Image: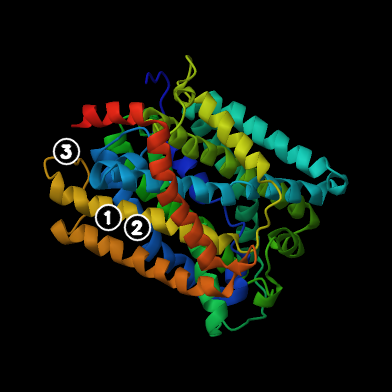
Amino acid sequence: MKRTRRLTLWPLIAATYFMVSGGPYGTEDIVHGAGYGGAVIVLFLTPIFWSLPVALMVGELSSAIPAEGGFYVWVKRALGRFWGFQEAWLSLAASAFDMAIYPTLFVIYLSELLPALKVGHRGVLLGLLMIAVCALWNIAGAKAVGDSSFWLFFLLLSPFAVVTLWVIAHPSPVSYPTMRLNHKDFIGAILVAMWNYMGWDNASTIAEEVENPQRTYPLAMTVAVATVALSYAIPIAAMSRSGIAPDAWETGSWAELGSSVVAPWLKIAIVIGGAISAFGMFNSLVMSYSRLPFVMAEDGYLPKAFTRITKSSGAPWVAIIFCAIGWAACLGIGFERLVTLDILLYGGSLLLEFAALIALRVTAPELDRPYRVPLGRAGPWLVAAGPTFMIALAVLYSGREQIAGMNAFVFGSLVIVAGFVLYPLLRFANRRVTERRDLKVT
């Protein structure tokens, strides 16, 4: 697969930022549930137990196996074709529930400035237009997406920099309890934080499109973790001096709160930033998820047409268009319950990746690992402990949510089981291709 223009370090950091985060948008419920001090603690501790271990795992496996398809290839090599397929299935299934929300958020933010977008089907049409633009942008190649993410990053965070500096310069004498002790609200705040810190492995699927991936990935993951954590915690810590009660925080309230603290014009800037956030996240995730159908087609699970790439950029244009159509069909899925379901499906794929990390240390010690998870043989086990605990917490919490008339955990379990059923069916449907691939492997 020929690549002519590759992602370098800073565009990869920016693209990873958007794959994981869209800026402080979405952190409002953490303040509401945990208070200002509790929110800052949650936002700093969550990456230590949730994000940093994943970033370390991605750093080692990306440097050892810098292949297109990333986590799918790691799991397939370490645990076999069956579990590799399950890894891809869980990731694509999660994307179906996740990706439709970003065009919806894009329209919601722009409708704050242009209320006419809420009339009739205009919002849906604008969402479809955004999906089409992102698909075309991705067909131009990973470098085009990475370079644009770099500049969108600065545009996105500039309104929050204004809020932070203003509140520091004009603190309010009113103070509130720094932390809430309500058990359910605090656990809910942790789950929202987990959702805001998900997706570190998504950047791995474009490894063949990254310049010097063995060196670039570990450094990009480390810098991105710190950048995301600081971009969340600093504005919230500053707002604790604004005199606004934690109860005033709710989903989407950054625009109103920012304008009340600084000036009405800032609401416009934050709303535009919200649209940039939704666009940037969707654009970067298209780049990540669309590589999965490409490598699955190479392995014989999907039609060969999915392996077609553009001559200029090497982007898998058929896979990009297919994914874009699928996500467009899901427009209108509500944000409610999305967090819990996302964590369940993403958590399953993440556990497979940690299993691959541990297994490859045992079965392939000869692999050249320019970067290794520290602490020797115990390192992979130790870094897997934190995410495993937090995924278990999410599973226990999922019993509170209902999706399609059933318990969210049951719904997520059915999605997981569907992967077990699909594997033999697709193997049978494409048995000639998969048999040839198996012979090459042996």
Across and down, in percent, residue 312 comes to 48, 15
Q: Which mark is residue 368?
A: 3
Is residue 326 among what the camera can see? yes
Q: Which residue is mark 2?
A: 351
Which label lies toward us, 2 or 3?
A: 2
Image quarter of the N terminus: top left
As drawn, 224 above or below 230 = above
| Colour mapping | rainbow
Identify the residue at horizontal 80%, vertical 51% (top origin).
Answer: 112
Which label lies toward us, 3 or 1?
A: 1
Across and down, in percent, residue 384 comes to 29, 61
Alpha carbon distance from label 2 to label 1 = 6 Å
Whether label 2 touches label 3, CB < 8 Å: no
Mark toward the start of the polypeptide (3 vs 1):
1
Alpha carbon distance from label 2 to label 3 = 23 Å
Say which amino acid is labelled 1.
Ala
Image quarter of the C terminus: top left
Asked if residue 323 lies left or right of residue 431, the reply is right
Q: Nearer the viewer, residue 300 or 222?
A: 300
Res. 78 image quadrant: top left
Say which amino acid is labelled 2.
Leu
Q: Nearer the viewer, residue 31 or 164?
A: 31
Whether label 2 touches label 1, CB < 8 Å: yes
**Helix, strand or loop at disc 3?**
loop
Alpha carbon distance from label 3 to label 1 = 19 Å
Across and down, in percent, residue 280 comes to 59, 41
**Helix, strand or loop at disc 2?**
helix
**Mark 1 burial class by Cα count in 10 Å: few <14, some 14-19, many 20+:** some
**Mark 2 burial class by Cα count in 10 Å: few <14, some 14-19, many 20+:** some
Q: Which residue is mark 1?
A: 355
